[in-house]
Image (tube, rainbow, N blue to C red):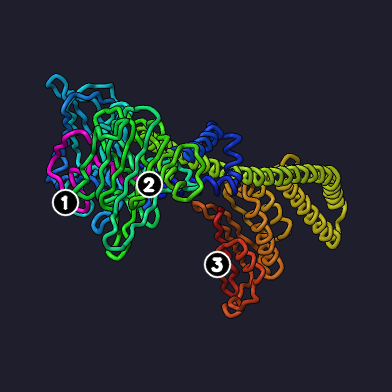
Amino acid sequence: MLKICTLNGVFLISGFLIVSVQAETLEQRVARGFVKGYKQNEARLAEIGKELEVLPQPYLREPTGTGGYLAHGRESATNEVVLRFRWGSPVELDAVALFPLRLFMDEVYGENLYWPGTINIKAVVDGKHKTIALSTDNQPLFCQSLPQLMHFDPVKTDMLIIRCTDLPQHPHEKWYSAGFAEVCIFSGAANVAPQATLRTTQSRQGYYVLAQEFLTDLQTPLGLPELSDRQGGQLFIKKILSRRPGTKKTYALTLRYPHPISIDAVRIDPAVEHSYGQGFPVRFTIDLLDGDGRIIRSDRRYEKFPLRNPGLNPHFSYFPETTAHAVRLNILQPSQPIPKAAETIVFSEITAMLQGKIQPRATILEELFQNKTIRVTQGAPLNTVPKKMLASANDGLTQSGPILPLREWIEGLAYRQQVLEEQLVLHKLQQRSLVDVGKTLIYGSLTLLLLVIGSAITIIVRNRIRMRREIRLARAKMASDLHDDVGSNLGAIVLHVEKLQEQVDTPPEQKRLQSIYRLTRESVFGLREVLRTTAPEVGRAQDIIAYMRELTGLLLGKTDFTFKADPSINQVLQNNATLCKGLLPFYKEVIHNAKTHSQCTHVDISFRREEKILVLNIKDNGLGIDEETLNKPRTLRTLKQRADWLHAQLNIESIPGTGTALTLSVDQT
């Protein structure tokens, strides 16, 4: 699960939204038009942005107030941490709010510290323990010290038990614990936790302002219940006491209402002048008065015992529900931040409350300060700064914003948590959609590019095929013309020569006719080979062995010869035009040399196959060649070159006076 454990997570995401709006990408435009749900998620994110602007927000800088409660270390995560709240009489409960710890110290940093994996809330009803709320494995996406608000059906009880298990481990050490900054237990809008007697598992009392009694003092690390709009801070009470010895340092502020009102709590909000809560009273009492100014109820907890600086948190004084005409604050000891500083009184609002709800504002405010009285009537002209400050002490606007009832504030923070988690999930979905769109665009572009290349290649190949077809047709036409015209003419020449040979008796003319006949027959054979290889549909395969035998007779004339050949060689040469073209000129050159230079009377020719090797052997009984002449490079150079072109092995043996034997071995493949 993705976690964002940062104090400024909300602002980071808000910044991301602003940047996204300002610099819209191609992926966003495509996703908006084609990805299902993208526009709806975008609209919902815009709604969430507007909701976050008006929802209560926590104080996200350094922690204020007390730290809360943290149990002593346990040996195992399976141990329990138990909190028990008991009231003098049964109260009706319907919700519990738990604030996580948020501490800044040398050994532990961060927030949502020691939040247990399982929280089981039980109420004692008719002597039996009844589970009314259960939270398991609750790890929020946003860790901002926001409270968890657990609703349940109203239950009437005098004891509430919060049992914590699956304890988290200390970040650096091998012990386990659980703790909370604050626990609020609601009966409707009223927080009844401060009226309960509290017992907990042994706490780390006093360690970094962690103690059992800090669980219900409303000194949360989140500060005042406030709205996000902090523009135009309100005026606040500010009094600097005289430093002269003997000066009576008294201060009293009375709020009078037009008719009796019911009160069960009085809230006093601190102000921010130089630091949080600076100038808040140290020792004071709060009285509820009747119509004659007599005290009906009084909270004297801090009459002798000083109050710790509340930071940004309000102070609450609780009473049984009482009908009163006025509320009075008596300051017995003002705050002195440092020894040499003047004693100062600073706070921003006094509010009467009933069941957690704000009561109507007072109509008359009376301030007694250093034996001088200032009286302000609601709606009367405020012609002096002291009167303006006094009037703002009960206008419902603290220095940080409008006052919110505690439960309304917590419900707003809990809803903020839900909205932030929804925002995070939607951002993740949108980002995933953009990544998918980006991949689609890349792959689509590559596919389009490949299609273009493929189309170009197809066009080129088709053009080449068309050109080859046209070439074949042209070859066929040319071959047909050669076959019909040239072939017919050569055939006619052969017939005329044969008739002339029968009519001519003189040797010279016979010799010339024999040469013409041989050349014509060679031309006919060559033409047929050309037609066979270039236009098979026009030409036809020839008997190459028969041609070689005929050619031998034409070249040797009256010289005696024998010719033996393996019939299968004919098929090999017909199927391998390259071999045939290279072999025939070699053969003609050998026979011509034997006739012209050897003065032989007999030539013995054999042509055989040895597996894939064709072996041509030609032997004459002529003059022969001496060894020295045979070894010269120029001797039989043409034959040697043609053998090299055929990648064949040529062996020549010759003895002067007995003849020459020549063997050519060529691979038929």
For this rendering, which residue is in front, 178 or 622?
178
Q: Mark 2 points at which residue?
A: 373
Determine which quarter of the picture holds residue 342. bottom left
Q: Which residue is drawn at 36% across and 38% down?
A: 255
First of labels 3, 1 by sequence position? 1
Residue 643, visible in the rendered structure: yes
The kind of residue tagged 1 is Lys
Q: How many circles with numbers are drawn on the protein? A: 3
Q: Is residue 328 magenta?
A: no
Which residue is pictured at 18% across the width and 37% down the height? Answer: 165
| Residue 616 x %, y % | 58, 58
Rounded to the nearest angstrom, the CA distance separating label 3 from label 1 is 94 Å
Marks 3/1 in contact by CB < 8 Å: the verdict is no
Which amino acid type is shown beneath numbered disc 2?
A: Thr
Q: Residue at x 18, y 53 (%)?
A: 207
Q: Which segment did they paint magenta?
A: 194-223
Which residue corresponds to mark 3? Answer: 651
Local crowd size for mark 1, using a 10 Å CA cut-off: few (<14), some (14–19), many (≥20) = few
Residue 174 disc label = 1
Main SS of residues in magenta: loop
Separation (CA) of disc 3 from disc 2: 141 Å
Viewer-side residue, 529 vs 364: 364
For mark 2, does the 10 Å Cα neighbourhood hold few (<14), some (14 to 19), or many (20 or more) residues? few
Alpha-carbon span between mark 1 and mark 2: 61 Å
Q: Position of residue 662 (x, y in %)?
A: 58, 65
